[in-house]
């Protein structure tokens, strides 16, 4: 056994030791999977309410979801296994686009110049920040810049774009899975960090200046 295989085996055993919830096969049905996901979401929302939403409820859900997965309460790709991921994604997209119904061409015409200037300044600032912070975070500046760009669209767009890029660039399924494994966690966490956390803080600062 090579050193790499030994490390992989050790890491796998260490991960399995954290699975305190040993679900029986009869409880791994789509209905029970959705029930567990809903339970984690409800618990996360309740805990966020206890702290008066000082932390964005979506971020709390993300944290609780990771913890539940680490302890074996949620499986890998739980929503995909339950067969509802695509349906939920379509519903979320419909909700996002529905919010645009209040925007009229007249409103866009009045603010289009400000939007272009802010986007340009934002892209420039994110580029400079990515070049400076990429190395301390252990990633290339291209990956860091891609993560920062999630502030322009957030979830679910970051998930969709990352999936499409991996599918288009990869030559085989193994390459696609490798790219998804490498990029998807960074992009999703980047989207939550920039849209749900940083944007709220920055907006509160600028509102006081206005």
Image: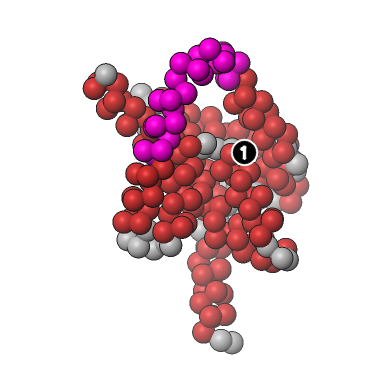
* Residue found farthest to the bottom: 1
Residue at horizontal 24 percent and vertical 22 percent from the top: 209
Where are the magenta residues, as a range? 99-122
Residue at horizontal 52 percent and vertical 52 percent from the top: 185
Q: Which residue is mark 1?
A: 36
Instruction: Judge whether residue 109 is colored magenta.
Output: yes
Instruction: Judge whether residue 82 is colored magenta.
Output: no
**Residue 10 in the image: above or below residue 208:** below
Q: Considering the whole magenta stretch, tell me its main secondary structure.
A: helix
Residue 57 or 206: which is nearer the viewer?
Answer: 206
Is residue 189 rendered to the left or right of residue 138?
Answer: right
Quadrant in the picture for the N terminus? bottom right
- Locate residue 121, reporting x and y percent: 36, 38
Quadrant in the picture for the C terminus? top left
**Residue 45 in the image: above or below residue 22:** above
Number of on-image labels: 1
- Locate residue 38, reporting x and y percent: 60, 33
Residue 160 or 101: which is nearer the viewer?
Answer: 101
């Amino acid at each position: 056994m090579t050193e790499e295989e030994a490390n992989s085996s050790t890491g796998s055993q260490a991960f399995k030791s954290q699975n305190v919830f040993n679900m029986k096969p009869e409880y791994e049905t789509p209905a029970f999977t959705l029930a567990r996901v809903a339970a984690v979401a409800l618990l996360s929302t309740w805990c966020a309410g206890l702290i008066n939403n000082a932390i964005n409820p979506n971020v709390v859900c993300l944290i609780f979801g990771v913890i539940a997965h680490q302890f074996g309460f949620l499986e890998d790709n739980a929503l995909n296994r339950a067969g509802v991921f695509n349906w939920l994604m379509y519903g979320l997209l419909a909700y996002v686009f529905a919010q645009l119904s209040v925007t009229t061409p007249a409103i866009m015409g009045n603010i289009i110049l400000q939007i272009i200037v802010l986007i340009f300044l934002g892209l420039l600032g994110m580029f400079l920040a990515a070049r400076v912070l990429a190395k301390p975070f252990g990633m290339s500046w291209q990956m860091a810049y891609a993560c920062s760009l999630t502030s322009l669209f957030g979830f679910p767009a970051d998930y969709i774009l990352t999936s499409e890029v991996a599918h288009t660039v990869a030559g085989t399924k193994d390459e696609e899975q490798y790219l998804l494994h490498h990029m998807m966690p960074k992009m999703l966490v980047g989207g939550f960090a920039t849209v749900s956390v940083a944007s709220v803080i920055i907006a509160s600062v600028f509102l006081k200046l206005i």
